[in-house]
Image (cartoon, coloured by chain):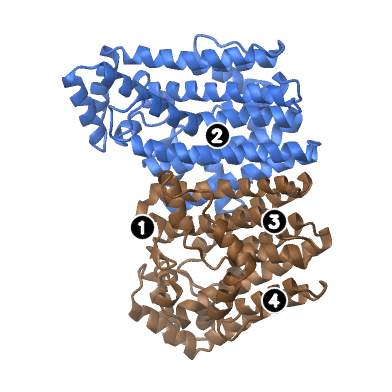
Chain colours: A brown, B blue
Amino acid sequence: MTIVASTDPLDFTGKLSASHSGRLLRDRLGQRWPESADRLSTMVRHALLPAGKLIRPIMALESAVAAGGRPEPVLPAALGLEYLHVATLVHDDIIDGDATRRGRPTVSAAYGTPDAIVTGDALIFTAFTAIVECRAGGVPADRIVAAVDALAGAGSDLCRGQVLEAGLAGDPAGAATEYLEMVRLKTGALFRAVCQIGALLGGADAERARLLAGYGESVGIAFQIRDDLLAYTSDAATIGKSTTSDLANGRPTLPVLLAHRAGGPAQRRQLAEALSRGCADPAALAGVRDIVRATGALAAARDVAAEHAGRAHRRLSTLDESAARDTLAAIAGWAAVPG
Amino acid sequence: MTIVASTDPLDFTGKLSASHSGRLLRDRLGQRWPESADRLSTMVRHALLPAGKLIRPIMALESAVAAGGRPEPVLPAALGLEYLHVATLVHDDIIDGDATRRGRPTVSAAYGTPDAIVTGDALIFTAFTAIVECRAGGVPADRIVAAVDALAGAGSDLCRGQVLEAGLAGDPAGAATEYLEMVRLKTGALFRAVCQIGALLGGADAERARLLAGYGESVGIAFQIRDDLLAYTSDAATIGKSTTSDLANGRPTLPVLLAHRAGGPAQRRQLAEALSRGCADPAALAGVRDIVRATGALAAARDVAAEHAGRAHRRLSTLDESAARDTLAAIAGWAAVPG
């Protein structure tokens, strides 16, 4: 599959999702949890379906191919990587008190906190089951072990990132480097594991798997900055989730940190106040949005995203030319361009 | 190590804990999370230390030996099994709203729900990392993969058991068979995995690993009934956690289900009312305690625990005689005798 990033980001993810890999993944995503089998199945299906952009599992499959391997043996693990990603969303939504995700009620809003905790846990465990299933497709046991190790390590990093993020809350004067370390752990680590696991299970050699792991981490960081920017460039209806959650939770994302650094005393006060309020209305968001634009922080944050996407690109350049490599390059480009 | 169950259960677990395996485990339990390294380490240490009875990791090590293997290569995984167990406690305490565990504040009571979710997640991921670490001790990759599969499967069962338990809440007229299926999933599955993983990683053959898995499941069921009985035979100070949590959460444990079946209309009404209240005071507990005793349900529940412990014993009988087998037999005996 060769997919070139268009100027319309939604169009790009639409193409990805409609690709052969995208359709394969979409068809199988909920298969393991039959409709109305039991309450847990119902909740897991609520979390998983309709599917999101499936960026991570698509990256796992494309990494396998770009590194000289085959996508088929990776398919169960690719689904597992989406389970793990969705598990983190389910738990994050409890933590953030968010009620909407992908345009529908979050699991915690629909079923309550206790059931949402268990739904997330079940998705985490099934992610590991899914990796083990690749053994039946002929993947050597040592590669499965390496993949389990990568996934478990990414999970631990994710938790450290989550705690670090809570520690940064309320302080718009924090250093961008701390924020970027948090993002590396919270988002970069899973993207890193996704590409590494795809390459390893697809049969790639160690050097290429390492390269793709680095590519994935950089894409993940760019992607998170992109996600942070969406609150200032899109509305909730377009992105399917709250645009005020970061503010309501006092989270200084990159645009806010950069705006604080560049802003005058009045702007700094307004940013600090918006973060400390513990709740956010459209007016507060609009105020922060104005400052982020006026100080040039929006453009500066875009530059940081572009820098990480550039790193990802450079890592790909040592791989042989292939349609899969082109797709991964396009994903890096897309991750740096907020919709 | 040969440890014979004494008539004093606390004395028995004290001996287990003071054994060579117990000390080895205790020394290493928190090693991975240095004191004051970061907030996540602090919370994980709060959850793990001081250690509980370490029954599960001790069973993993003894299973390795009883099945003809060695305990040393299993040690990292045994620690991982305790991490996973503690992860379930941390998440359960959020779900049940419990504030005390092992005589100290629960993670959620000390650090709040968001951080407790992340602490539990981190322990789950690290459990898998710990299993993979056995590879460095010379365990073949295929056995690691089987152990990961067993752990992930047990985790999924646990989640199904948790949801099933929530579904049984409030109904003291439910069938004991449904309750036992819930216990098999919620508690039996992890004990099963503990013994199976110990045997597999220790180098046991498939037949012995299967036998020990069955032994573990039966011990787990007996152990859960024992735990349910503690609310009616001990006080909170002795067992270090709330004795009214099951009642407060409307959970009909086996003694209550059996008492409802055996009781008269007035007793049934009182049980139904105690479960439906959504909170429990010592007076409500005392009332249920009286009914559970008067109807013979306490003794009947003990008989069910003894039946499962008997099954566990019989499974052991086909293994060669060894000190480890004796210890496992003593654990089965202990699990059926409430303190």
Instruction: From the top left corner, tell me how far across and down residue B309 is, in percent.
Output: 52, 15
User: In which quadrant is the C terminus of chain B drawn?
Assistant: top left
The residue shown at (36%, 42%) is: B97
Q: Amino acid at mark 1?
A: Ala
Q: Amino acid at mark 3?
A: Val
Instruction: From the top left corner, tell me how far across and down residue A23 is, in percent.
Output: 58, 65
> Label 1 to label 2, Cα distance in Å?
36 Å
* Chain ID at mark 1: A
Instruction: From the top left corner, tell me how far across and down residue A51 is, in percent.
Output: 50, 63
Of mark 1 and mark 4, the one earlier in the sequence is: 4
Q: Which mark is residue A293?
A: none
Picture quadrant where residue A245 is located: bottom left
Q: Nearer the viewer, mark 1 or mark 4?
A: 4
Q: Amino acid at mark 2?
A: Pro
Q: Nearer the viewer, mark 3 or mark 1?
A: 3
List the residue tagged with mark 3: A74
> Label 4 to label 3, Cα distance in Å?
19 Å
Picture quadrant where residue B128 is located: top right
Q: Amino acid at mark 4?
A: Thr
> Label 4 to label 2, Cα distance in Å?
56 Å
List the residue tagged with mark 1: A109
Mark 3: secondary structure: helix
Instruction: From the top left corner, tell me how far across and down residue B152 is, in percent.
Output: 59, 41
List the residue tagged with mark 4: A2
> Label 2 to label 3, Cα distance in Å?
41 Å
Q: Are marks 4 and 3 on the same chain?
A: yes
Query: Which residue sits furthest left?
Result: B266
Packing grade of label 2 (10 A; few <14, some 14-19, many >=20) is few
The residue shown at (37%, 13%) is: B300
Packing grade of label 4 (10 A; few <14, some 14-19, many >=20) is some
Q: Is residue B196 shown left or right of residue B107?
A: right
